[in-house]
Image: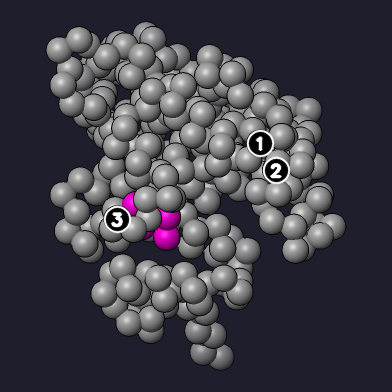
Amino acid sequence: MGFLAEAEIPVLRHTARELVRLRERENALGARDVTRVVMQDPMMTARLLRYLQAHKHARQTRELVEVEQTLLMMGISRFFEVLPARLTVEDVLREQMAALVQLLHVVHRAHRASHYAFEWALLLHDLHAEEIRIAALLHDLAEMLMWIYAPVEMLQIRQLQAADRTLRSKEAQARVLGFTLHDLHREVAAAWNLPELLQVLMEDEHAETRRVKNVKLAVDLARHSANGWDDAALPDDYAAIAELLRLSQEEVIAMLVPQPAEPEPG
């Protein structure tokens, strides 16, 4: 686990290309332009927050979680100077294509979770919905890091679970890695000194609070629906989301589940 405390976090190749393109017109950029690119990549978002926490000004009294606020504090020029996107996940995993595919699945899942969490936060009139969005985006960061830096072991875990459908994820992880991804998540968040608010929002054990429950349910929905909208865990998700949003399960399903396209008239 100690290695990840100092390891360089690679970013998606698309992110690296977009940041190069943006830097070419740096003087015409606003923080929102860069925020859009950063927020599309959980690894880049984590790099930014880790850097800010490691270089906090002594007079800074409030921890920043929102990416746009962070960029406004740093300045766009400083961001490009200290956080160049040199290393990409595609480079790191160029000989581990199966692991790269799995990593991209997790990133896609994180995007969906962050979208759900943000939309629900708005419905709940959360004044800091962006914090909820980022917590959901980074909730499974430990899994992403392990796909990058321990691809062989992560594939072994998948093989174990494919061979035994009753094997719980945490048990398979402990068997192969010697620890669980949840353990790693806590270690990394502490080692990087991520904002305390963000650590709380990503901690499922605090799901009795509405904001943490929002994040957890969004992550659960994204994970289960990735298996298909007929996944057996989804009815329980719908019930919990309905309770959170004070809606009926029918309203939740109508809001979330894609409807089959109607056949075109012959």
Displayed quadrant of residue 23: top left
Earlier residue among tags 3 and 2:
2
- Assess whether mark 2 and mark 3 are in contact (beta carbons under 8 angstroms): no
Q: In the drawing, what numbered circle is on residue 179?
A: 1
- Assess whether mark 1 and mark 3 are in contact (beta carbons under 8 angstroms): no
For the point 19% across and 54% down, which residue is it? Answer: 126
Earlier residue among tags 2 and 1:
2
Above or below, comparing residue 201 to residue 30 in the picture: below
Element type at mark 1: loop
Displayed quadrant of residue 122: bottom left
- Assess whether mark 1 and mark 2 are in contact (beta carbons under 8 angstroms): yes
Residue 162, visible in the rendered structure: yes
Q: Amino acid at mark 1?
A: Phe
Real-space CA distance between mark 3 and mark 1, rounded to the nearest whole angstrom: 27 Å
Give the main secondary structure, helix, strand or loop, of the magenta stretch.
helix
Q: In the drawing, what numbered circle is on residue 230?
A: none
Real-space CA distance between mark 2 and mark 1, rounded to the nearest whole angstrom: 6 Å
- Mark 2, residue position: 173
Element type at mark 2: helix
Q: Amino acid at mark 3?
A: Thr
Element type at mark 3: loop
Q: Residues within 10 Å of mark 1 (few under 14, many from 20)?
A: some
| Foreground of the two, 14 or 57 | 57
For the point 32% across and 18% down, which residue is it? Answer: 52
Q: Which range is magenta?
A: 212-217
Residue 137, visible in the rendered structure: no
Q: Position of residue 29 (x, y in %)?
A: 25, 23
As for residue 195 lying within the magenta part, the answer is: no
Earlier residue among tags 3 and 1:
1
- Mark 3, residue position: 209
For the point 18% across and 26% down, which residue is it? Answer: 62
Q: Residues within 10 Å of mark 3 (few under 14, many from 20)?
A: few
